[in-house]
Amino acid sequence: MMRGLVAALAGLALLFGALPVSAEESYRIYVSNEYGADVTVIDAATEQVIDTIPLNGRPGDVRPRGMAVSPDGRIIYVAQSDFFPVLETPDDRIIAIDVSTNSVVAEYWVGTNPERVDISPDGTQVWAANENAAMATGYDLTSGEMIGEWRVGVEPEGVGVSPDGRWVYVTAETSHTVAVIDAQERRLVRYFLVGNRPRDLIFSPDGRRAYVSAEIGGTVSVVDVSSHQVIDTISLGLDSRPVELELTPDGKLLFVAGGGTSAVYVIDTETNQVIHVIKERMGRRPWGITVSPDGKKVYTANGLSDSVSVIDVSCLCVVNNISVGRGPHSVEVGVVPND
């Protein structure tokens, strides 16, 4: 019965996700608080906390971590794990939040210990990296059925779907690899090496490049997607400890959260050079990072200061810090129509 309910709610989530995007919209910022077992909601216009969404579980029992957003910005997906990483329990799930109501509209079981999550460009699939199971899983939001699961390396962490929906990349921290899954043929096609302890990845808007952060290596690998090969390595310094990455909508600037230096590194994707390092007024240990849909603001989830830093892209400077819940892990921006 529970899985039937999940499938029904999946259809509801897709209905919300299919709404057309109008010009009259506002943004909300969503922050997963790993140690608070909740999600903080911030109004982007006022930069004030407007809601806190409790998740199913007590602080200390469950951990909301990686996040993703539907293509139209109307649904926020949160990867939630329990503190029993080798066992699958009901607390291991992907939670879907409707931006217009800040309510949970669906839950998906995608195996044990999901760390990060991504959504296909058409909004019909959710993909998760299952860290302690050394697996990646795909879930069809239309049918409510599992697409498949693949062994992808030791301690998989990051997951990303290419803009054309063809490729799913999954980083593995301990094997220092990226696994490549062909989402159309539903098979694992290859692995390739990147920097030491890869954490997050992102595809360029045109799908030609992918960028992979290496926390221990202090680097960002630049990948040619057509050949699934590293073609350049950008050094941020061994103390940088880079984790999440985000691109501006035009793909020209890459922002990298440097947890070790409490900084954000700004990379010009045409030259693959660091052009600026944002440190002044930054919160402590930025871990998650995202860019607003209009490309004007960058938001970081700061795990050691329980805050979100707001960066103005026009000056590449921090303009505000907002207090959120305990242990913010990731941050995403949702789109809500104005009444």
Image (cartoon, rainbow, N blue to C red):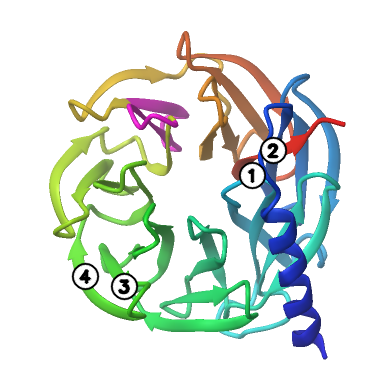
Residue of label 3: 182
Type of the residue with mark 1: Gly
Give the mark nearest the N terminus, 3 or 4: 3
Residue 297 position in % (x across, y down):
56, 22
Q: Is residue 74 above or below residue 126?
A: above
C-alpha span from label 2 to label 4: 35 Å
| Range shown magenta | 249-266
Query: Is 93 covered by the magenta stretch?
Result: no
The label on residue 335 is: 2
The label on residue 46 is: none
Q: Are marks 2 and 1 in contact (CB under 8 Å)?
A: yes
Give the mark nearest the N terminus, 3 or 2: 3
Q: Secondary structure at mark 1?
A: loop
Q: Is residue 17 above or below residue 309?
A: below
Q: Residue at x 80, y 86 (%)?
A: 2
Tell me the quadrant of the picture where the C terminus can be found.
Answer: top right
Type of the residue with mark 4: Tyr
Q: Is residue 315 left or right of residue 185?
A: right
- Residue at the extreme bottom: 1
Query: Is 254 covered by the magenta stretch?
Result: yes
Q: Secondary structure at mark 4?
A: strand
Type of the residue with mark 2: Val
Q: Are marks 3 and 4 in contact (CB under 8 Å)?
A: no
C-alpha span from label 3 to label 1: 25 Å
Residue of label 1: 73
Mark 1 or 4: the one toward you? 1
Give the mark nearest the N terminus, 1 or 4: 1
